[in-house]
Image (cartoon, rainbow, N blue to C red):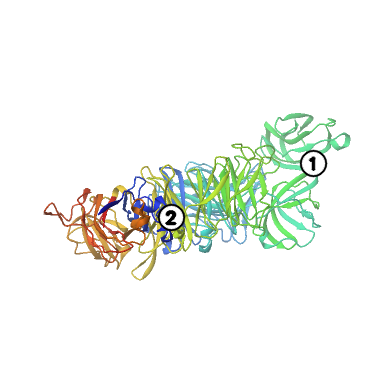
Amino acid sequence: MSKVSILAFNRGLISPLALARVDFKRTALSAEEMTNWMPRSLGSMMLRPGLGYKGGTRGNAKAVTIPFIFAVDDTARLEMTDGRMRIWVDDALVTRGTVATRITNGTFDTDLTGWTDADEAGATSDWVAPGFMRLYGTGNTAARRRQLVTCANAGARHAVNISVNRGPLKLRIGSTAGGEEYLKEATLYPGEHSLAFTPTGDFYVELFCYTKYAALVDSVTIAPAGIIEVATPWPADALDNLRWDQSGDVVFVACTGYRQRRIERRAVDSWSVVTYQCDDGPFKVANIGPVKMTPSVNSGDGDLTASAPYFRVGHVGALFRLTQGGQSASASLTAEDQWSAPIRITGVDGNRVFAVIITGTFVATVTLQYSVGDPGAWVDAPNGTYTLPTSISYDDTLDNQVIYYRIGIKAGAYTSGTAEVTVSTPSGSQTGICRVNTIASPTVANVSVLTDFGDTTATDDWSESYWSDEAGYPSAGRFFEGRLWWAGRDRIWGSVSDSFSSFDDKVEGDSAPISRSIGSGPVDRIYWMMALDQLILGAGGKVWAVRSSTFEEPITVSNFNMKRCGQGSAAVTGIEVDKNGVYVQCSGAHLYEVAQGEDGKYASDDLAKHVPEIGEPSLVRLAVQERPETRIHCIRSDGTVAILILDKAEEIQCWVPFETDGVVEDIVVEPGAIEDKVTYLVRRAVNGATVRYYERWAMESECRGGTLSKLADSFAQVTIDGGAATGLGHLEGREVVIWVDGKDGGTATVAGGSISGVPYDGAAIVGLGYSAPYKSAKLAAIVPDGASLLCSTRKIMRIGLIARDIHPQGLTYGPDFDVQDDLPMIEDGARVEQSEVRTAYDEPMFSFEGSWDTDCRVCLVAKAPRPVTLLACVMEIA
């Protein structure tokens, strides 16, 4: 007789193909089967925690959940279904109460009745078909419309739902006209907004716009009662392609085939889903073909005409940049401290002469100012003050100097009226930018001029933006080193430093934007980006590290390199785990780690070499849990989960499968103080219908057999009274297990949302049962120098267990899963109390119903709701 032991259960699964590797140290502590057990780095393993029911998805539809993490104690879950977003906070959907307040004519079906015209001088607002409020500013003054709304529920929480077709524009809600007592001034980008406020009486809703191009508002209505829903552009079949990153209260989202979006939070119950707008790029290289572009206006809204068919429907939303000879800057001045944009004067003699034109009716002093070298340090120009309409040629005689000029009204110099001012010159060049709104024909696009054009003449010096329905959009985004990075196909873009919506290539120096092609291998779709010590890109063909030339220097336009660092990726979002990254390799069934070596370079490695089957049939979703230990949850395409416990210091790399009576489709992890909050989205069959439930992993401390031991799936906490309980409608028709007041309450079937016949009363956890089978490795691997035991007959005579927090019937054992015995009922000559969970278990060895065999194993099974934590298993073999 000899004794062998399993002193730790933290090596997890090993491949059946490696069971004979008795020379492999980890084999002895590994298992051929180990489902629904949760090992710890210390070596023990427990029956894994149950899943608590938190609610269903919208219409039980497929969903992808975006974690919104502002701080450890300020989180939300953003549920994305087919074209809709809902918000979960503290495991409850954010809702609105009922109010009777209404906005008059909030959908603008035929006119702007009910909305007061408060346009400032020179600005205009009107109605335009098929049903928009249109607002045109002047650049200096705003078009404004406001409505005094009769509040029917003073002191109650209200919200306005605003749909913006074109923008940006601004919103204020206050107790006074133009006031912001209830909702501070907010910028509204094109998209959907649901913004909450609490009025104490009647209130004003005011929309206004300063831009010289039009903003279009589709509707302004009081939000209905019930669950907050915000429209999104993503249908169900696009949800798996969502990629996101967060900065403060804004989540930036990329999705293959869709323009990038911003999800904005202004309060717990105030959310927007809007277009991510860049007004200055990024642009492709300049046009090299024969097509010329001609704008019909210098500013505002107009047409862009191509000299040959060019425009397609997919160009809507695209930017076009035109460079034309000459420069011009105009403004409508209606108040003090208003100025035109500058023009740049260089050269000598006649090249320095420019026009100053002032028209209109006004009482004010208009001043021409200049700044040497760069705009900013403005000084009044000699003989540059005007009080009447004027049209002159101005010659500064400052040969060979670079001087910027602007024209406007200084503080204290305005009384009344409007001065229309222009400074222009035929010398130099001016670059303007427009955005396409609609396509009138293959040669004509309706546009909004974002940066004034210098002229309305044709030019062949133009370029188109990289992003549009025609050209495509980035498929991934990430923050790194103070920039917002986007990547798609074979290209990567980095924003201007600390300016996440700017790609202005006129910015110089280290903060300039970055636009680079991968330039090697096939044209790959980029599936994800990771912000490690270097920026890591996962593409189908390769994984790339984006870095500077020198270690720890920031990436800049002039200090940018891309190096291959791993095998290609599958179309699954990679995740950051401590200082390293983890991703699904292009086969779809292998998990790889990309880590930095001592030389500072990144390389990838397979995380499942000892159990290569663990990712089969394929991995479809990854998430990392950091507390109580580092665990990577890998959802497989069959709805089960493979969990990897990682501890580099202890050299632990432990794979264990998770299974439930349903299909796991999604996961979201939120930070927690003791344990992270891990929520699965589980598709189940309940009462003949398919449902999708959010279910939260219970904390390990809640699964040790106390009054409310949470060892059941889709569980709810109820009160058993008279052997019955209600509140279980989400498990209608299902058999459930019951843990009541510290005891196993048996099973029952839910009928009418209730159960009955429970033998105990009290607080209870009721949910679906699950089992946890464990099958050890071969004995030869467990015995020191056990190679001699291979192909020899042995028998396990007795076993002993060391455990904690174990129910007297919490574990069965045997040579296989078909032959299982309960733990001993008699100890020290006395019958074991069957309802008492034992804090510690360390009893003498007991008989094992094994047989003489060349492949003796120990098979253990735990079943919910009975707790068990195993510390060691000792075997006596013959």
Q: Is residue 144 left or right of residue 390?
A: left
Answer with the quarter of the image where residue 684 lies. Answer: bottom left
Badge 2: how crowded within 10 Å, few (<14), some, or many (20+)? many
Q: Which one is closest to the eye, mark 1 or mark 2?
A: 2
- Name the residue located 81 percent from the left edge and 51 percent from the top edge: 457
Q: Which disc number belongs to residue 688?
A: none
The outermost residue toward the left is 829
Label 1 SS: strand
Q: Is residue 190 visible?
A: no
SS assignment at label 2: strand
Q: Position of residue 204 (x, y in %)?
A: 50, 47
Q: Is residue 549 above or below residue 465?
A: above
**Left-right relation of 460 to 613:** right
Contact, CB < 8 Å: mark 1 with mark 2? no
Which mark is on residue 667?
A: 2
- Which quarter of the figure is the N terminus placed in? bottom left
Q: Earlier in the sequence, mark 1 or mark 2?
A: 1
Residue occupying the far right of the picture: 349
Distance from the alpha carbon under mark 1 to that under mark 2: 59 Å
- Count of marks overlaid on the render: 2
Please state the horizontal and vertical placement of residue 305, each as a whole percent of the image.
Answer: 76, 57
- Residue 424, which numbered label? 1
**Which quarter of the rendering shows the C terminus?**
bottom left
Query: Where residue 72 appears, x then y in whole percent?
Result: 42, 42
* Residue type (three-letter) at the residue carrying disc 2: Ile
Type of residue at label 1? Ser
Q: Nearer the viewer, residue 830 or 778?
A: 778
Q: Quadrant of residue 651?
A: top left
